Image (cartoon, rainbow, N blue to C red):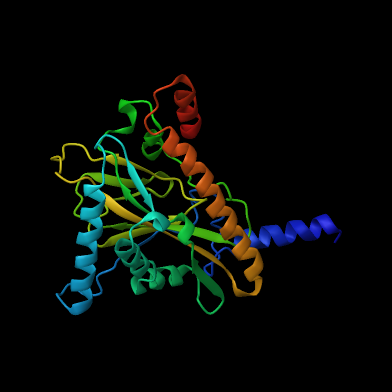
Amino acid sequence: LNMWDFLYTVWFTGLYCIDSINAFSWFPGSLTFNRIIKGDVYEEKSEDKTNVTTRQYFKILKEWAIQNMTEKDISHHWWYETLPSIQKDMFYHFTFDKSIFEKLSQLFDRNTYTIEPLFGMNELYVTSKTRGNESVHSDNVFFTPHIDGPFLFVPFVSVYRILLGLNDNKEVETIFPMNDFSHVLNKGEFLGFDFSREIHYIDYKQNMEEQLEPRVTLKLHYVMYPKWMSHFGKFIGYLNVEYNRLFRSLFLHTIKPTSIIEYMNSYFVVW
């Protein structure tokens, strides 16, 4: 083999080995393997001490988010590092939730893969009450089938986004069109998917009675990589964090455009 044949072989092998299942799931919306994870942070449907604490944290985080909303027609985002210390500690608690790690470990065997949080991407998020097609702003991207990250062809490494529901939700549906799967994320439930490889979007379910509170969720992020290539895995995690920082700055700048330049940038975000 010459050098290019060797590099291609390593690259292709790395795309095949992005998890410990190895089911040819390297491209967005893979038809060969469903890599979406789903679970519940309540270990039991009971009022034990763990679940009481979880419910208290949900209530405090949800109420803080709703109290700090400026208007209902746009989404709201608070990054982990900007939260008050109490809310930040609660966010940190959920980042290391046992149920989430157990579900991730079903795809990424913890004997051979490292599962590492990416705090720089985490956010507390309130869904817009306006459907994406009702106005021109960057919130439209949530209602458009899309992939969140640009690193779909990076071998060996995956970055996962976990959506954790903080309140009751009956109207906002998360849809994965290539997997023919959708779910209305309710309180305590979480959905996880590959940040750069899974096509998805949200929509409001038809003929549903409008709920009083908007959907409030935590967005948690993790990088997974084989233990023998920690430097490369950490580097890809860093690139995802920096990409997310740059893109969310542009996103927030165009969430409520008023000038021609802002409208143009808003179209660019959706594109």
Find residue 71 and report its image quarter: top left
Q: Is residue 206 above or below residue 81?
A: above
Evaluate whether residue 124 shows in this view.
yes
User: Quarter holding the N terminus?
Assistant: bottom right
Residue 60 position within the rendered picture, expressed as x and y whole percent measured from the top left: 22, 60
Q: Residue at x 18, y 46 (%)?
A: 213
Name the outermost residue toward the right: 2
As drawn, the residue found furthest toward the front would be 85
Q: Does residue 109 appear to the left or right of 153 in the view shown?
A: left
The percent coordinates of residue 50 (x first, y second) are: 23, 76
Q: In the rendered image, which quarter is residue 251 located in? A: top left
- For the point 50% across and 76% down, which residue is it? 110
Depth order, front residue of 158/107:
158
**Residue found at x 65% / y 64%:** 232
**Residue 248 sits above or below residue 136 on the image:** below
- The number of callouts visible is 0
- Please provide percent x and percent y for residue 6: 79, 61
Residue 156 visible in the shown view: no
Quarter location, residue 200 = top left
